[in-house]
Image (spheres, rainbow, N blue to C red):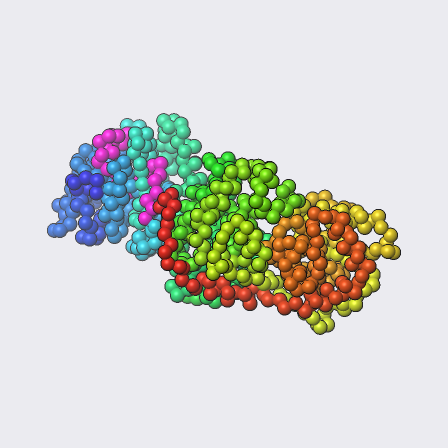
Amino acid sequence: MSTATPVTVVVPVYRGLDDVRACLASLRRHAAGCATDHDVLLIDDASPEPGMAALLDGLAGGATGGPTVRVLHNAQNLGFAGTVNRGFAESDGDVVVLNADTVVTAGWLDRLAATAATATDVATVTPLTNAGSICTVPRAVIATFDLDGDQPRIDDCAAHVAAESLNLRPAVITGVGFCLYVTRAALDDVGPFDAETFAAGYGEEVDFCLRAGARGWRHLVDDATFVFHRQGGSFGAARDERRATSAALLHQRYPTFGAENAAERARDPLAVPFAALELGLHRRRPDRPLVLHLLHNSPEELGGTETHLRTLVEALWQEFDVAVLHPVRGGFVLRITFEDRHGTRAEQELHLPGAPELDAPAGTGGPAGEEVLDEHAAEALRLALALEDVAAVHLQNLVGHSLAPLAVLADFPGPVVCSVRDLYLACPHHWLLYRNAEPCGIPEDRSLCARCLPEAKGLPVEYLETFRDTVTRWLDTVDHWVFSTRSAADYFARVYDVPEERVQLIPHGATIPLGPRDGDADLPDTDAVLTGPLRLAFVGRGWAKKGLGVVNHLVADLATMDEDAVDVEVHHFGELREAAHPDLVLHGTYDNRDLPGLLHRAGMHVVLLPGPYAETFGHVMTEALVAGLPVIGAGYGALGERIRAEAVGWTIEPTDADGVRDLVVNLARCRPEVRRATRQARRVALRTVAETADRYAALYRAPAPAGREPTWEATT
């Protein structure tokens, strides 16, 4: 408590006899268990209702062991602000201004007083409520406890708020007057309410808070306390008119208040406390561990990482609940999918505010989203960990999160798994392509980096040193580094020295049904490749990174050749992002699950993957093998490793367009080689994601190594 003198609970009374009875009954009911020394001051503001004065006078004195109850009667109506000011003058310590149409709950005053005592610059504290501006709990909470109904479950709601609160006590521009704890120090410095300007009621507490804020005082919300507010019991039909009048006065006196208030609503300081309350409405089964995945996109996106994660989650659903944290414009989204105590699958999605706009300039370290340790991302992860009991964390892709999660998780007690799906941790320009065309191979000579990073990311080459030094510093945060191919691990090892015992090789597995395999009658006869045009399927997004330039060059060269000598068709399946040669046959976008059937119906013989990017696995290659088709791909990275290991195709140098053309021409002239590779592609043993899921489950269950200690002071 901020004062040694008792706290005075001032209750101005005008109309609403039933509301007053309920308010005073709640004060009596919860006084016995209150540790805060307090008294109650009831002020009758010349109430016109028969029986009001007698009701109040009958409460004077107070029961044995309870707070002292004093009753004052205004000789004439002073209005709400004037009546409150009389209460301020009649008290010596802190004051709670409590509307007569409220119902207080267990522990309410102790928690408000404790929040007021957290710092010497606290002027006011406001609890949560069902009808109180920014302090109004979410609609889901209101509906759950029937707070809009005839029999609101007020005590149940208060118990829920107290149990689920994160005790963040967020600061706001102004408190809310339905229940406003005001410290004596602030009153002595700022003065009482402006009863002359706001005599009609509404706005007086806002004016007081803005005056206090201008003098350096702060206003907090006690997110662990709930006080019910019926609203409008005294003002009745005049409420809207008085509110409009007060709003006009406030905006005239404080011209910037409107913009500041709008900014606060956009920032939403109660978002996280309210998220905790919503999460608490549907409790997870305590025996189901929760795995938190960090992703760069919404899990609904169609990329390989997102598709693999969705498939993995389904495969592990019998054992694990799942949460996904990913960046969005202006913040982060946390989606939690879980089985509740009734065995029902439930999902909640929460917006965690605080991230910079994605296209706004950053304070340090480069453009937005490129801070080495972004405090916004760190705070989002801390909040996600605080909202739920997380058993394991899986870093799926850190693009958009910065490197902050590595630091935040340094003291996380459970296992931390990182799937190196791309090489972002090796270089912020994770495609490792200069101008989207020239693969760099992670060079030791930084001269190419000095040209590439400023062009591609707006970053100086010095940033790369800081970035890699930071990853090195937090390398031991990750207990299990997961690579889908040995080539991906080798690329990573060009920059970082990861102990081999922390390296896990887990091929991703197919994210689509495997379908028919070798010998199945549904597959076209392999002899079909011996006659007619050789049909190549260029699969994936049509742009430079995926090799569209090489494809255009190939199609252009084929158009100049004698069709009788070289009969080749090139088809594109996927989204076209850049201009294509007019002879490229376009099929448009597709669903990955339908791709094998689509390739068969179009009569494709070979899948062409000419992108210069060093793939870490190659989901499209897996889909080609599901279709039983051989592949042409880069000789380096995962495609080269897999093509050579399984003898299911041919490798190329993607930047050598003439070399690609020559290979295609030779294959068109040597069809038995295509048939051989086709038969081999149909014999390859493929596994689904579900068949690899047990490997991930074992990592999630494994205890984290002992000795992890947090050392990034900014996270504490």
Q: Indicate whether 541 appears above or below 646.
A: above
Residue at 58%, 45% (x, y): give it. 443
Residue at 27%, 51% (x, y): give it. 105
456 horizontally vs 521: left or right:
left
What is the quadrant of residue 189 in the picture? Answer: top left
* Residue toward you, 395 or 247: 395
Question: How far from the left and from the top, in percent, is residue 448?
Answer: 60, 40
Question: How far from the left and from the top, in percent, is residue 644?
Answer: 66, 61
36 horizontally vs 225: left or right:
left
Residue at 66%, 64% (x, y): give it. 646
Figure quadrant of the N terminus = top left
**Magenta span contains residue 187:** yes
Question: How far from the left and from the top, in percent, is residue 521?
Answer: 73, 72
**Magenta span contains residue 227:** no
246 horizontally vs 315: left or right:
left
Tell me where the magenta segment starts and ends, as one range: 167-194
Residue at 39%, 31% (x, y): give it. 257
What is the quadrant of residue 47 in the picture? Answer: top left
